[in-house]
Amino acid sequence: MTLRLGPFPVDPPVVLAPMAGITNVAFRQLCREQGGGIYVCEMITTVALAVRNPKTEKMIEFAPDENPRSMQLYGVDPEITAKAVRRVVDENLADHIDLNFGCSVKKITSKGGGSAIPWKRRLFGAIVKAAVDAAAPAGIPVTVKMRKGIDDDHLTYVEAGLIAQEAGAKWVALHARTAAQRYSGQADWEAIATLKQALDVPVLGNGDIWEGDDALRMVRETGCDGVVVGRGCLGRPWLFADLQAAFEGRPERVMPNLGEVANVMRRHAELLVQWWGAEREAITDFRKHVAWYLKGFPVGPQLRQAMAMSSSLMELDDLLGKLDFAAPFPEANLGQPRGRTNSPAKVVLPYGWLDDRDSDAVPEDAEHDDSGG
């Protein structure tokens, strides 16, 4: 059965996870050109959206042909969340709202935000319900993304999933790690299976999907209704072509040679220039992607460094022209982690945060721009 998001069929059942500084208009377009699915913009704070922060106004732009337009919001206050969602409704800013309860960054959790919130079950439920109620007049579906819990001693995912379902969330996506794990170790796919058994709404799995076949294996092993892909597509937007083929039962997988990768890199830079409207800023933005694109290919350190310091399309073109276009795709890299990897760490929480699960007091000073997880 095809996964649905309100009025929108999601076929293949694949979602691009929001990633700070990555999933802007240009990167989403690059990925959309490869395959179908839902492509979510960078995480937006509800406060910034409500007060029309200029930086945020740029981040919430969508391409004319994006459908559905998918926006992820992060907030800690039900009232401000409702205000932000009402703005989305009143100004027709998006067709789907995803709520982030997965961020494990210290400056978020230390204020009681992100992956700390589901521990406060009443506050968590109030935030989800505020978003659902504010979105309802426009028929905008609201979904939830979260982690297993704060750490192995403070797991919340099943209870939080049930609360989100009761509040009206259309699906729940689980990054199958705790906040304490951050991006370390292996994702616990058994937790995805447990959540799927507990809920009636669709459950999406997130964590350690590096190849199209990983997605099929996750669905097979957990029974989940779809997958959320983050780090696996860094420097590999063609992963979405592989995911589409995998879900359609086709065996082919995209393994571009270095010349084809160079063409994708050029396209990515070009799209960034179109979005930024300023070449230098766009190419500076592009630099972070260079190492991901070239991972595993025989490219010398000087050329890599020069490309990661380029500041114009002309300069980038010159450097791309020095690559060995015939170099084959490094198959040894298949199935390997990409992007952020780090060590487990104790989650920093506000003083006394774990003492009372039923307080619905809004954490003070918890709104920040930061990466989702």
Image (cartoon, grey):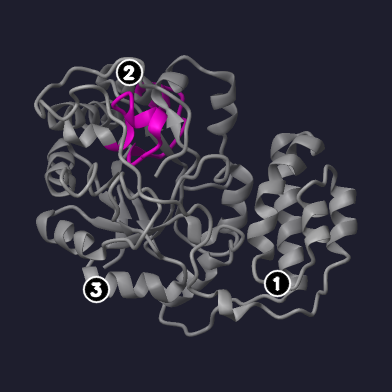
User: Residue at the location (22% across, 44% down)?
Assistant: 149
Sooner in the amino-acid sequence: mark 1 or mark 2: 2
Range shown magenta: 86-115
Q: Foreground residue, 64 or 339? A: 339
Amino acid residing under circle 3: Glu
Q: Residues within 10 Å of mark 3 (few under 14, many from 20)?
A: few
Q: Which image quadrant is residue 217 in? A: bottom left
* Outermost residue toward the bottom in this view: 251
Residue identified by numbered label 1 = 297
Q: Position of residue 260 (x, y in %)?
A: 73, 71
Q: Which mark is residue 221?
A: 3
Seen from the viewer's position, the closer of residues 20 and 196 is 20
Q: Image height check: is 332 above or below 95?
A: below
Q: Nearer the viewer, mark 3 or mark 2?
A: 3
SS state under label 1: loop
Residue sitting at x 10%, y 26%: 356
Q: Secondary structure at mark 3?
A: helix
Q: Which residue is mark 2?
A: 80
* Kind of residue at disc 2: Ile
Q: Residue at x 24, y 73 (%)?
A: 221
If the image is split into quadrants, where does the C terminus sit?
top left
Real-space Cα separation, disc 3 to disc 1, in angstroms: 33 Å
Q: Tag 2 or tag 3, which sits nearer the N-term?
A: 2
